[in-house]
Image (spheres, rainbow, N blue to C red):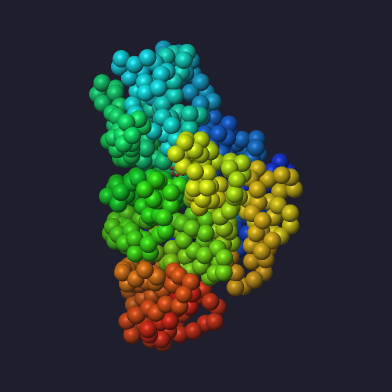
């Protein structure tokens, strides 16, 4: 176990800078704000901080639309501020991972400005320019080169009148897709990545990296997707983990990481990736990435109408999914473990109870996740048990995915239905400012926050929780310490128990002579867990309820109670 990579014992903390801490009163979080809060991160004990994008950007998608990869947006500060942040984190033994958004740039990036300037531009081929569908009048409905829909509603093609051609954008029309078929594009990306590593960063979280290879035909055409309404089709089979994706990642590894890979952390964000894809992406022998963010579990509560039509989670589905990924990446590869990020609703509201049992359910969901085999990710505020925003009006939302969806869906869903879908699933739920204290705007800003602070900050905030040993914060701190101190958490084998139980999540981890049992009651009622009598009188390492106890079998679990038990 001594030769296992360092990140098997590590916990990563994600900062979404816009909502973390504002230092200058403009209502938007910034890098000097991060400096004010490094002690919070050090006390929590995390090993790595991943920063969502702070690069120059028109902010159409909150920085995931980049116009200069090698500068900091004035909204967040300067390159010098970033150097200070990196130094302050390094001083505390915390590594820094940058977001790498290279499936697309902003339409205001000089590369795209040049590419758009003329059909003869030397950079024309850096993006996906295509003529109208054969026999159709350019710019008219249905004349797009393919029927692909964008992730952010509407077609994935934007018509450019000046040249009479369309460009591809899988996300917003201000996020044109780069053409990775062109070797100059790849070389420019790798050069930029080396520049960041030379500046002292410790790795990358690679935005939608499994979408960069498109299934282009030898004649340059892109295929239509299957369409259910005769209009927009599902193009994903033609760009999710496309034909050259492994070739590109191997090349990136060789060109950027070779020689320094051991000290770095690389994680690919891979929506739609299957377990089989992930085995290839994360097999160390192939030298692609260390781990990926897979999306299977965060899709389990999507209904027939998609993410904004949610249905209740069945715990047995979650167990089947996680159990399969644990087994599938046991021999080769590695899992990343997450509930939350800036795109997902808050876990305590989603699959926990953000009312009566908020503290207990936040702790229990955290325990279940962190005791799996893989590298856990904590999204800012998750360590406080922050809840969804509970917004009640369309005007309160800021997220482009949400706003575009509302514009489209108003034609076929009632306002009440829509508002319920957004309240449950909108990305803005995760993006309300971090709740530092009970003061106005929660200590986040002295100005007007870009997105309203959750009024529950008077009860849920970092100051209160740091002072309370029974808080969600201290539970996360203990989980992180447990991963550092107990090799079985990092490297033990995983065995799922009680796969058919709809309320109790149960599994063991084993390394050599040490075995851990994890039990979590994922419900608001008392539940009984039938476990092997060998666990009788075993020692509880960590519980959601602070009255230390030993195990009697069967175990009676109080509402939302969880236990981590150890025996040798
Ligand atoms: O948020 C989503 C769920 O509806 C996804 O479709 C999401 O857009 C997808 O996971 C890709 O996410 C990443 O790339 C996007 C950016 O908007 C997200 O914030 C980012 O995490 C485009 O860069």
Q: Is residue 536 visible?
A: yes
Q: Is residue 207 above or below residue 185?
A: below
Instruction: Say if 259 sits above or below 456 in the image.
Output: above
Picture residue at 51% right of the left edge, 35% below the top: 407
Query: Farthest residue in the left direction?
Result: 218
Residue depicted at 45% across the width and 70% down the height: 523
The quadrant the C terminus occupies is bottom left
| Residue 430 % position (x, y) | 55, 51
- The quarter of the picture where residue 136 lies is top left
Q: Percent x, y for residue 257? A: 41, 42
State the residue at coordinates (59%, 53%).
389
Between 495 and 160, the one nearer to me in the picture = 160
Quadrant, the N terminus: bottom left
Q: Camera-side residue: 447 or 509? A: 447
Residue 532 locus on image (x, y percent): 32, 81
Q: Is residue 360 left or right of residue 275?
A: right
Q: Is residue 101 visible?
A: no
Side (left or right) of 386 relative to 209: right
Q: Quadrant of residue 503?
A: bottom left
Residue 98 percent location from the top left of the image: 51, 44
Residue plotted at (56% across, 55% down): 388
């Amino acid at each position: 176990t001594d030769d296992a990579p360092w990140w098997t014992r590590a916990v990563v903390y994600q900062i979404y800078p816009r909502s973390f801490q504002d230092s200058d009163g403009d209502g938007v979080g910034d890098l000097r704000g991060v400096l004010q809060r490094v002690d919070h991160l050090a006390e929590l004990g995390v090993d790595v901080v991943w920063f969502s994008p702070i690069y120059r950007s028109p902010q159409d998608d909150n920085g995931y639309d980049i116009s200069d990869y090698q500068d900091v947006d004035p909204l967040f500060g300067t390159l010098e501020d970033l150097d200070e942040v990196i130094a302050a984190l390094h001083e505390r033994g915390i590594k820094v991972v940058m977001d790498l958004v290279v499936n697309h740039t902003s339409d205001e990036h000089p590369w795209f400005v040049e590419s758009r300037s003329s059909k003869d531009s030397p950079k024309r081929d850096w993006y996906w320019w295509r003529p109208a569908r054969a026999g159709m009048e350019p710019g008219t409905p249905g004349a797009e080169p393919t029927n692909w829909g964008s992730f952010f509603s509407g077609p994935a093609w934007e018509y450019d009148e000046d040249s009479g051609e369309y460009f591809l954008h899988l996300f917003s029309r201000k996020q044109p897709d780069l053409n990775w078929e062109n070797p100059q594009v790849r070389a420019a990306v790798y050069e930029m990545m080396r520049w960041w590593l030379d500046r002292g960063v410790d790795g990358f979280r690679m935005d939608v990296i499994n979408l960069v290879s498109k299934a282009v035909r030898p004649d340059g055409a892109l295929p239509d997707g299957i369409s259910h309404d005769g209009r927009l089709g599902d193009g994903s089979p033609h760009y999710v983990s496309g034909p050259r994706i492994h070739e590109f990642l191997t090349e990136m590894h060789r060109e950027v990481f070779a020689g320094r890979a051991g000290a770095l952390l690389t994680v690919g964000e891979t929506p739609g990736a299957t377990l089989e894809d992930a085995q290839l992406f994360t097999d160390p022998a192939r030298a692609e990435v260390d781990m990926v963010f897979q999306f299977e579990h965060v899709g389990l509560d999507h209904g027939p109408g998609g993410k904004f039509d949610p249905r209740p989670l069945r715990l047995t589905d979650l167990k089947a999914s996680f159990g399969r990924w644990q087994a599938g990446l046991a021999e080769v590869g590695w899992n990343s473990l997450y509930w939350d990020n800036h795109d997902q609703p808050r876990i305590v509201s989603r699959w926990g109870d953000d009312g009566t049992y908020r503290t207990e359910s936040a702790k229990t969901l955290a325990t279940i996740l962190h005791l799996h085999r893989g590298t856990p990710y904590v999204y800012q505020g998750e360590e406080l048990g922050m809840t969804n925003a509970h917004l009640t009006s369309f005007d309160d939302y800021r997220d482009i995915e949400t706003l575009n969806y509302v514009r489209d869906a108003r034609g076929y869903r009632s306002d009440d239905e829509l508002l319920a879908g957004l309240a449950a699933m909108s990305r803005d739920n995760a993006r309300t400012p971090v709740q530092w204290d009970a003061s106005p705007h929660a200590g986040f800003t002295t100005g007007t926050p870009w997105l309203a602070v959750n009024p529950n900050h008077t009860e849920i905030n970092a100051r209160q929780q740091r002072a309370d040993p029974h808080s969600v914060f201290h539970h996360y701190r203990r989980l992180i310490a447990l991963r550092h101190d107990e090799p079985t958490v990092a490297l033990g084998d995983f065995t799922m128990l009680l796969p058919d139980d709809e309320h109790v999540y149960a599994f063991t981890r084993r390394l050599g002579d040490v075995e851990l049992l994890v039990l979590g009651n994922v419900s608001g009622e008392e539940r009984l867990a039938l476990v092997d009598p060998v666990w009788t009188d075993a020692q509880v390492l960590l519980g959601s309820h602070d009255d230390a106890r030993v195990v009697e079998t069967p175990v009676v679990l109080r509402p939302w109670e969880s236990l981590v038990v150890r025996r040798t």
